[in-house]
Image (cartoon, coloured by chain):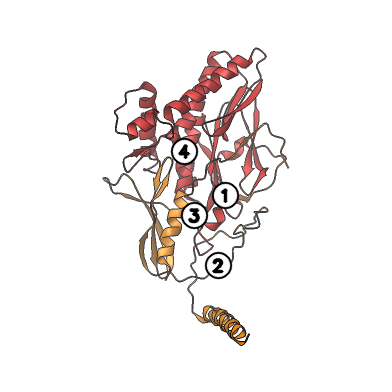
Chain colours: A red, B orange
């Protein structure tokens, strides 16, 4: 059973291999994502985020959870990840990974074992070995790396458009990375670190190398990649 | 008719003069330590895959890049130029009430494995790729360096 819907401004694909899965199971998960969008979108009036930005104090369990993850991430990334900026609140960088993780828990509660959720390129897999391809940042139809995951989360942060026009004038910018792919024990971990590490630029790969149970593959604007020491254990060669 | 020709000559002459000026002006190349042997895998034709050094003048000093607003936060880069070269980049931390700057090693760890990306078979079940652009960092750095240009 495999379905894709566009929610939160991105395609969300859910595939469940368990034979007992039905349309209504997937619909339940899609509805969960729709509710997350209603609740946490900075663009929707009446969302928790909009209300906070309007100066209204909000008390909500899920909001608290997201705030606490945001605070933790900010600390762990030396401030590179921050959901507050000049009085404006936008937790979107946490909400994505968090919601995929929650959606995964929904499927697990139903007893499903072999599935994945792909929300805009951020993926949580479960059960069997899934082959995941990393997009070529220069040619979106191409894959440049294939990894095999069975319970991990994988997230890619990056910019593919206009990238080369906005680099520094000297043409030899050290901070010209176009893609940072992170594999971690779950999608929330992968997502929050991918976001922060990409913002650090090239040194981001060093930051990720220091983290336990987090592996990464970084691509620079010349098409040259750097990987953390443990990344290769996930790689399968598909020439 | 004569006027038109005259005008054209002036314009063309101006272009030629400018081109000559550019060639004659001494330039300091901005050089950073670069790992050699980069091989790009078919980047788009408008990409800066050419790794030839464009020559620009950079004035010594510390330049704060624009503060770039991104959906998950903000980035500002401080570029330090000395001896005409970019020697350091620091990242001030927000929010403003706790000013702080973190110096991060600008070189990638030489012990980490590197490779040119290579096309793989597309026989995969799922694809991971960025859907959002995270330009804030790069925009801010570019802004800082453009201030350093003399």
Query: Which residue is at a point 55% across and 17% down the rendered structure image?
Result: A28
Q: What is the distance, in whole Å, between disc 3 and disc 2 at their CAs?
A: 15 Å
Q: Is mark 3 on a helix, strand or loop?
A: loop
Q: Is mark 2 on a helix, strand or loop?
A: loop
Q: What element carries label 4?
A: helix
Residue A114 picture location, percent across and down: 62, 20
Q: Are the residues flagged by discs 4 and 3 in contact, CB closer than 8 Å?
A: no
What residue did someone put label 3 on?
A175
What residue did someone put label 1 on?
A161
Q: What element carries label 1?
A: loop
Q: Are the residues flagged by discs 1 and 2 in contact, CB closer than 8 Å?
A: no
Q: Which chain carries label 1?
A: A
On residue B53, which mark appears? Answer: 2
Q: Which of the two discs, 3 and 1, labels the residue nearer the N terminus?
A: 1
Q: What is the distance, in whole Å, between disc 1 and disc 4 at their CAs?
A: 22 Å
Left or right side of B103 for A165? right
Residue A212 picture location, percent across and down: 47, 35
Near-viewer residue (A116 or A33): A33
Q: What is the distance, in whole Å, between disc 2 and disc 4 at their CAs?
A: 32 Å
Closest to the camera, between mark 3 and mark 1, is 1
Q: What is the distance, in whole Å, between disc 1 and disc 2 at their CAs?
A: 23 Å
């Amino acid at each position: 059973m495999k379905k894709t819907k566009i929610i939160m401004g991105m395609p969300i694909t859910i595939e469940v291999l368990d034979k007992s899965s039905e349309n209504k199971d997937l619909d339940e998960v899609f509805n969960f994502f729709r509710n997350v969008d209603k609740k946490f979108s900075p663009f929707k009036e009446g969302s928790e985020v909009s209300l906070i930005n309007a100066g209204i104090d909000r008390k909500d369990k899920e909001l608290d959870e997201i705030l606490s993850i945001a605070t933790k991430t900010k600390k762990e990334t030396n401030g590179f990840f921050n959901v507050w900026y000049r009085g404006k609140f936008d937790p979107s960088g946490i909400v994505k990974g968090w919601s995929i993780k929650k959606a995964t828990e929904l499927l697990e509660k139903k007893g499903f074992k072999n599935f994945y959720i792909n929300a805009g390129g951020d993926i949580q897999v479960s059960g069997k070995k899934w082959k995941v391809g990393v997009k070529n940042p220069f040619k979106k139809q191409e894959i440049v790396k294939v990894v095999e995951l069975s319970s991990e989360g994988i997230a890619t942060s990056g910019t593919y458009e206009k990238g080369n026009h906005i680099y520094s004038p000297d043409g030899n910018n050290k901070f010209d990375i176009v893609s940072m792919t992170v594999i971690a024990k779950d999608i929330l971990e992968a997502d929050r670190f991918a976001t922060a590490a990409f913002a650090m630029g090239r040194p981001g790969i060093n930051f990720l190398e220091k983290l336990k149970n987090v592996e990464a593959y970084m691509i620079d604007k010349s098409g040259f990649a750097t990987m953390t020491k443990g990344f290769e254990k996930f790689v399968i060669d598909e020439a | 008719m004569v006027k038109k020709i005259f005008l054209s000559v002036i314009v063309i002459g101006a272009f030629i003069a400018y081109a000559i000026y550019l060639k004659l002006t001494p330039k300091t190349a901005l050089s950073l330590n670069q790992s050699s042997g980069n091989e790009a895998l078919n980047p788009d034709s408008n990409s800066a895959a050419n790794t030839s050094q464009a020559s620009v003048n950079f004035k010594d000093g510390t330049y704060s890049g624009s503060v770039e607003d991104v959906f998950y936060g903000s980035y500002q880069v401080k570029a330090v130029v000395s001896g005409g070269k970019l020697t350091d980049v620091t990242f001030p931390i927000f929010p403003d009430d706790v000013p702080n700057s973190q110096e991060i090693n600008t070189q990638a760890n030489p012990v980490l494995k590197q490779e040119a990306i290579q096309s793989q078979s597309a026989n995969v079940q799922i694809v991971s790729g960025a859907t959002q652009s995270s330009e804030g960092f790069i925009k801010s750095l570019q802004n800082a360096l453009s201030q350093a240009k003399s």
